[in-house]
Image (cartoon, rainbow, N blue to C red):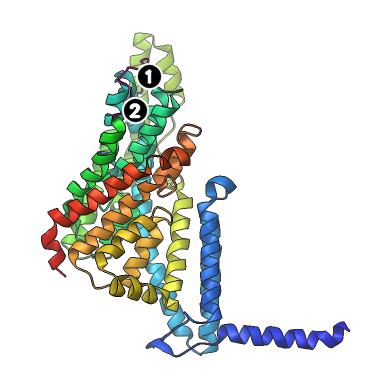
């Protein structure tokens, strides 16, 4: 019985496999349109399932990089199988390498930025800033505004995730048991960090992608400064009315900066300047300047290691003279600065997630789905409505795939519209706590105080700021909407 059925089963599976590889006419020279095939449908389902697992990261405790890495592999295997069947392996290989190169440039750029931020953290610069704020004994309302403003102005340089974590640490330290205040502060910090990151190429991965793609020049991002201010201030003003105007207990915390902290900060700013000069003056990819900046940090790390014994000897003599036993104990535990430890502490889960998303979206684009989406959004719809809609979608779907999809589609849009999608993708994630890396991170750091539902209750106010920032951009930068 089983032997009789086996040939039929094999035959059925063969027919199914061949139907997966069957393809309509060429969509473009050297490219097949797979949007109406089983291969395309399966790829879409795999991507949706992978993203569902990403969105459930907080519940499943499954790192977000894992599902998208597997999904990317399966999608490109499906593409490879179809193109092999049609004798077009060079086309699929070229498409994969092109997508991989786009990721590699961005990944190396982000890796250097993360290394510098980790180095500054290791030198205790952020701890010193936090201790200063805690020590000052600000009122709740002052603390609400101060953490929001600092998040807004630090995130353009130190990225929105790092900035949000730093400010949240201050709030949790000062108001340990006041859940309502912590929740409001965390919402304000997420909105401020995302808004601040929208007007700088270094503030968010999406702005970096737009800059690297050459759609917006470095100095042109500053046209989004006032719309970003509006996005932050509108919800902040409303929420501040619900903050009690009382003072928490003052907490004293002494933090001693490690040697070279400010010099590393200066090297980071020099690295940023080098990256901007490479792109703006020489027309070379910004990643060249960032990798050169990593060399700056390595040389300075070498200097710190070589001069450490002399520095420790001087500090130990001073501590012995003062009879400071605590300082002597601390000096005994000093270890040399190692730049490769800072590289190892980069957010590898984020970088690998970024790889998975870029390869998934690149694969779906090569199948023809992004051309289909572009036709719907940017031809049948008005570009303004399309960009506003995509910004709202980035609160549900991470802004990285949204922005990468738009850049891959590369629709014919005015300069004003490219700035608009940069703004909306950057600040749209503030609408939900899961809509941005900053929000997800703070739910973990302020667990039990800052929650999904706590953020959702203020979503209408945040949406008001979102709409106000879009209108501010359209009004203030009206002339840019006429420049292609």
Task: State whether residue 379 is above or below residue 297.
Answer: below
Q: Circle 1 sits on which residue?
A: 253
Stretch in magenta: 241-255
Q: Is residue 199 visible?
A: no
User: What type of secondary structure mainly makes up the magenta span?
Assistant: loop
Residue 253 is inside the magenta segment: yes
| Residue in the foreground of this view, choosing between 134 and 341 | 134
**Which mark, residue 130?**
2
Q: Position of residue 261 (x, y in %)?
A: 30, 34
Q: Residues within 10 Å of mark 1 (few under 14, many from 20)?
A: few
Marked residue nearer the N-terminal end (2 or 1): 2
Residue at 13% x, 53% y is 476
Point out the residue furthest to the left here.
479
Q: Circle 1 — which element?
A: loop
Image point (49%, 82%), residue name: 36
Q: Secondary structure under badge 2?
A: helix
Q: Are marks 2 and 1 in contact (CB under 8 Å)?
A: yes
Q: Residue at x 29, y 75 (%)?
A: 379
Q: Nearer the viewer, residue 311 or 368?
A: 368
**Which mark is on residue 61?**
none
Q: Going by the image, does 422 lie left or right of 29?
A: left
């Amino acid at each position: 019985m089983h032997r009789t059925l086996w040939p039929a089963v094999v035959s059925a599976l063969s027919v199914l496999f061949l139907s997966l590889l069957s393809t309509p006419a060429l969509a473009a020279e050297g490219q097949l349109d797979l949007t109406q095939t089983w291969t395309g449908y399966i790829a879409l389902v795999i991507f949706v399932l992978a993203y569902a697992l990403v969105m459930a990261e907080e519940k499943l405790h499954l790192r977000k990089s894992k599902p998208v890495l597997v999904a990317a592999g399966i999608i490109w295997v499906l593409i490879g199988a179809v193109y092999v069947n049609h004798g077009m392996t060079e086309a699929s290989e070229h498409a994969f390498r092109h997508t991989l190169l786009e990721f590699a440039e961005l990944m190396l750029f982000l890796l250097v930025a993360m290394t510098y931020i980790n180095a500054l953290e290791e030198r205790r610069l952020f701890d010193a800033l936090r201790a200063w704020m805690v020590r000052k004994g600000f009122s709740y309302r002052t603390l609400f505004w101060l953490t929001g403003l600092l998040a807004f102005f630090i995130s353009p340089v130190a990225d929105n995730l790092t900035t949000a974590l730093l400010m949240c640490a201050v709030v949790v330290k000062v108001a340990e048991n006041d859940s309502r205040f912590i929740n409001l502060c965390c919402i304000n910090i997420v909105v401020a960090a995302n808004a601040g990151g929208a007007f700088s190429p270094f503030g968010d991965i999406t702005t970096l992608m737009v800059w690297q793609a050459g759609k917006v020049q470095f100095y042109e991002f500053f046209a989004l400064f006032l719309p970003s201010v509006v996005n932050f201030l509108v919800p902040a003003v409303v929420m501040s009315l619900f903050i009690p105007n009382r003072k928490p207990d003052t907490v004293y915390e002494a933090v001693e900066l490690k040697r070279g902290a400010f010099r590393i900060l200066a090297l980071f700013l020099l690295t940023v300047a080098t990256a901007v000069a490479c792109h703006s003056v020489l027309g070379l990819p910004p990643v060249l300047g960032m990798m050169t900046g990593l060399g700056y940090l390595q040389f300075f790390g070498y200097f710190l290691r070589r001069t450490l014994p002399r520095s420790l000897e001087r500090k130990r003599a001073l501590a012995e003279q003062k009879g400071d036993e605590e300082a002597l104990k601390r000096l005994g535990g000093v270890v040399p600065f190692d730049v490769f430890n800072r590289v190892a502490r980069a957010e590898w889960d984020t970088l690998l997630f970024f790889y998975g998303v870029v390869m998934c979206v690149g694969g779906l684009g090569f199948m023809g789905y992004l051309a289909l989406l572009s036709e719907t959004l940017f031809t049948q719809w008005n570009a303004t409505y399309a960009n506003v809609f995509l910004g709202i979608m980035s609160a549900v779907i991470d802004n990285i795939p949204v922005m990468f999809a738009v850049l891959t589609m590369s629709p014919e849009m005015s300069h004003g519209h490219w700035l608009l999608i940069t703004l909306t993708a950057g600040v749209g994630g503030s609408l939900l706590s899961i809509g941005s890396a900053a929000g997800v991170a703070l739910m973990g750091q302020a667990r039990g105080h800052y929650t999904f539902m706590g953020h959702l209750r203020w979503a209408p106010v945040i949406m008001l700021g979102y709409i106000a920032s879009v209108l501010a951009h359209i009004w203030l930068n009206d002339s840019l909407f006429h420049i292609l």
